[in-house]
Structures are given as C-alpha cells and as structure tokens.
C-alpha cells in the first residue's frame, strides 16, 4: 500500500516544474497519466542521452518516472472526447499552460467540473490565474529565470561585489512544483471532508516571493533593500564557506555552544569570553572572519571536519561525484536506478526525500515512452489511433500544429 494509490492524476504539464510536481505524486503511489501533445513533451529530446537508448534523455527520465503516457491532440475532437472520458474517473488534472489555453478547447475547469464535481483542477502558471487573484502579468509567459529575477531571488544571490545571479538549479520551477503538490494534497483532503473538488492555483512568481521571505521581513523592519551576502548571512556569524587547502568547507557556529566548540578547536579560549553573545560576534565579524579563514586555510577539508564534527555544524562543499560517494545518500536511497526501455541498462536519478514508515514512496520506475499506455488507458473504448495516410518529415517544434500551448506561446514552465 502507498499513500496515494487510490488517486488518479491526469498530467498535462511539460518541462520541469509541473512534471516535478506530478512525479512527487507518482512517488507517493498516485496513478499519473502523462497526457502529451503530438510529438510529446519536447524535453524528451533534451540531452544527455544514454548510448543504449536515445528515445528520451536524462532530463525527461529524471522528472517523469513512474508515469504512464498517452498522446492526445486537442485540435482533434475525438482526442478531446477521449480526454473527457478520462476526466470522468480522475481525481486530479494538472496543467501549466498560460491563462486561457484550455478554454480554447472547451477543457477548462468549469467544463470538466460539470462532468466530475469531485475533480481537483490544479493550474501552475507563471503569474497565477484570475480565478484565485488577478495579475497585470497574467498574459505573460514565464520561465525559471524570469521567476527568480522577479521574486528577488537573483538580487540576493551572488557575491557582494558581483552581479545578480540565478540559483544554479531551477528553484523557480522545483519549489513551485513542490508547493503545487502541497496545494493538490490539501484540496484532496478537503474533498474527502466535503465531497467537492475545486480549482487550485500556484504561481511561480508567488512561489519566489515566498522563497525570498527573509528579504521581505528585512525590508519591512529596516526599510532597506538587503544586499548580496555571498555565502555569509546578514544576521548570523559565523555562517560562511571557507577555503581549505584542498577545497571548501562551510561552518555554521550559530549558538553559544557551537561557538565554544569552534573556539576550542581553534585554541582561542579568549574568544569565548570576549565574544560571548551572537550580537557581539556579528558586530566583530570583520575581525573574526579573517582569523577563522586563516585557521581553515592551513588545513585540509577532512582535518577541519574532524576537528569540528559533533560540536559545530560543518560540511565539505561537495560536487555531484562526492554526493554519489556519500554513505548518507546511499543509505537514505537518494540515488535510485531507472531502467532504459528495451535494454538491460539502468541510469541513476535522484530519489525522493519524502520518507514514510507505513506507506513508503516507491521512486525508480523509468519514464514512459510516448503513447506507451494508449491501449490500457483507452482501448477498446475508443480503439487504436488511426495510422496517418502519408509519412512526412516533422516540422520544427515551434511550428507544429496540435502542440497545445507551444504554437501560441503558452508555455509557462521551464
């Protein structure tokens, strides 16, 4: 038994944030049916590819595991009818098109809710949906970079003397996707209490403002725009990355106990008395930081960690190869193997951080081939997809008809 094994999700999302959201639901046991436009989610063709199979790349594999695939063309009435038939028995529809896209096909929330009043319809957009709150930006497309820029994340990321910098990973997508999953689960819980579904909405811009909560309260309390702090913290010290002779280590000695442990390791007992409180240490950080940096620089990363382990929060700055070698990651099953279709090969993808004692998630099933599950989802109700009369070379992606949301600039996710 898994936590969501009685939930069916119709997933119309593409690229990263939406698929990450529905992947979390699939990990928790939901039956996630990925409804793809003709040709499929375009990130199927995004590298890297494994030499044993090039039908989809690592990007698609990483965030579409555990799903079933069905290819539908919403320009075709028969395919729209097939989708409506699936909605009748679905619990959740998730989409990340721009406002108004689903209305073009008569598949918006109101139409679907008439058929299935218990349906939770979850829209993930750049700037939200007018059903939950208007925005002057609602007609604009959005990507991770745009959301990070608008939400204040870029402004506070990077070195103090450097330019605004995006977070290396797609937090505009991933964090929004996580919040969207929370939104969906809350709506499902409400439905269990009332019998009624509802429309729910998570905006990327909103999510980034939430992620940047520290700058919001700082500006309110001080009336000053916070500057970039690099790896340090504006109100806590020591809380920074320091360069050792073979890499970098982070030290976060926030409490008095942590500070005492750092002073003992550095053989600086006088600091315990001289800088006995957090505010005193913060005020003196320009004098203390160089001394800590010098102590770290004379040692290897391992020596620093060994000197502080158990008394001071610290860690090496790891790259992904180090993550692969980490015992914690192995024992917590944070790297899982996914099959490549039609081969004996596997690839490694990130596991799930959601751990449950009674209903543990089950990540690791490979991502689906395009339209792989048509027969089990639709036949014999609507029969097999008719073969095209002629074969032609595909047009470039941005010119293909039937690619819902791509031909009209409706993509709201990166």
Image (tube, rainbow, N blue to C red):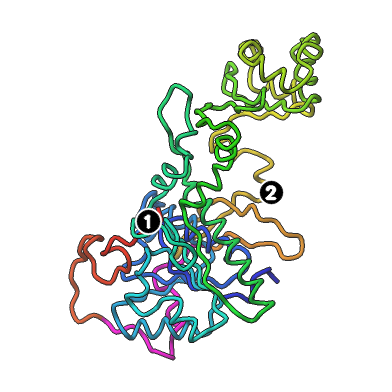
Q: Secondary structure at mark 1?
A: loop
Residue pictured at 38% horizontal, 64% vertical? 97
Give neighbour class at mark 1: few <14, some 14-19, many 20+ (Cα, 10 Å): few
Residue 360 in magenta? Answer: no
Q: Position of residue 209 (x, y in %)?
A: 51, 46
> In this figure, what is the number of numbered marks?
2
Residue 393 in sight here? yes
Q: Which mark is drawn over residue 332?
A: 2
Tell me which label, 2 or 1, sits earlier in the chain.
Answer: 1
Q: Position of residue 366 (x, y in %)?
A: 51, 62
Residue pictured at 42% horizontal, 74% vertical? 70
Q: Position of residue 2 (x, y in %)?
A: 68, 69
Residue 81 appears in which quarter of the rendering? bottom left
Residue 400 appears in which quarter of the rendering? bottom left
Residue 44 in sight here? no
Q: Quadrant of the N terminus?
A: bottom right
- Measured Cα–Cα span from mark 2 to mark 1: 44 Å
Residue that numbered label 1 is attached to: 136
Please state which of residues 120 and 265 is positioned toward the viewer in this rendering: 120
Work out which residue is located at the far bottom of the displayed protein and give it.
381
The answer to whether residue 400 is left or right of residue 368 is left
Q: Secondary structure at mark 2?
A: loop
Q: Position of residue 64 (x, y in %)?
A: 48, 61
Q: Which residues are magenta?
A: 366-387
Residue pictured at 38% horizontal, 89% vertical? 383
């Amino acid at each position: 038994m898994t936590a969501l094994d009685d939930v069916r999700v119709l997933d119309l999302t593409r690229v990263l944030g939406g698929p990450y959201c529905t992947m979390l639901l699939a990990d928790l046991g939901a039956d996630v049916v990925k409804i793809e436009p003709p040709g499929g989610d375009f990130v199927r063709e995004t590298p890297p590819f494994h030499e044993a199979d090039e039908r989809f790349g690592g990007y698609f594999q990483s965030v579409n595991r555990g799903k079933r695939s069905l290819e539908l063309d919403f320009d075709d009435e028969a395919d729209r009818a097939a989708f409506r038939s699936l909605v009748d028995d679905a619990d959740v529809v998730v989409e990340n098109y721009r406002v108004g896209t689903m209305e073009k096909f008569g598949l918006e929330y109101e139409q679907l809710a008439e058929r299935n009043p218990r349906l939770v319809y979850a829209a993930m957009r750049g700037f939200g949906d007018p059903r939950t709150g208007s925005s002057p930006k609602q007609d604009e497309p959005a990507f991770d970079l745009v959301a990070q820029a608008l939400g204040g994340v870029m402004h506070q990321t990077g070195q103090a003397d450097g330019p605004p910098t995006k977070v290396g990973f797609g937090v505009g997508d991933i964090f929004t996707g996580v919040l969207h999953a929370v939104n969906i689960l809350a709506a499902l819980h409400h439905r269990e209490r009332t019998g009624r579904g509802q429309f729910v909405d998570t905006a990327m811009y909103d999510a980034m403002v939430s992620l940047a909560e520290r700058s919001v309260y700082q500006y309110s309390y001080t009336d000053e725009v916070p500057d970039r702090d690099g790896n340090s913290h504006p109100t806590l010290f020591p809380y920074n990355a320091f360069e050792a002779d073979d890499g970098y280590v982070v030290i976060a000695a926030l409490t008095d106990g942590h500070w005492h442990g750092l002073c003992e390791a550095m053989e600086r007992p006088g600091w315990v008395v001289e800088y006995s409180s957090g505010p005193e240490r913060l005020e003196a950080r320009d004098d203390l930081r160089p001394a800590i940096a010098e102590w770290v620089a004379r040692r290897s990363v391992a020596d620093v960690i060994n000197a502080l382990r158990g008394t001071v929060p610290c860690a090496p700055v790891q790259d992904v190869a180090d993550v692969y070698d980490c015992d914690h990651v192995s024992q917590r099953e944070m790297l899982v193997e996914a099959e490549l279709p039609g081969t004996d090969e596997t690839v490694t993808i990130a596991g799930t951080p959601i751990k449950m004692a009674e209903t543990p998630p089950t990540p690791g099933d490979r991502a689906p081939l395009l339209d792989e599950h048509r027969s089990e989802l639709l036949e014999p109700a609507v029969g097999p997809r008719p073969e095209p009369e002629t074969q032609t070379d595909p047009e470039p992606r941005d010119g293909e008809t039937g690619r819902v949301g791509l031909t009209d600039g409706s993509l709201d996710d990166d």
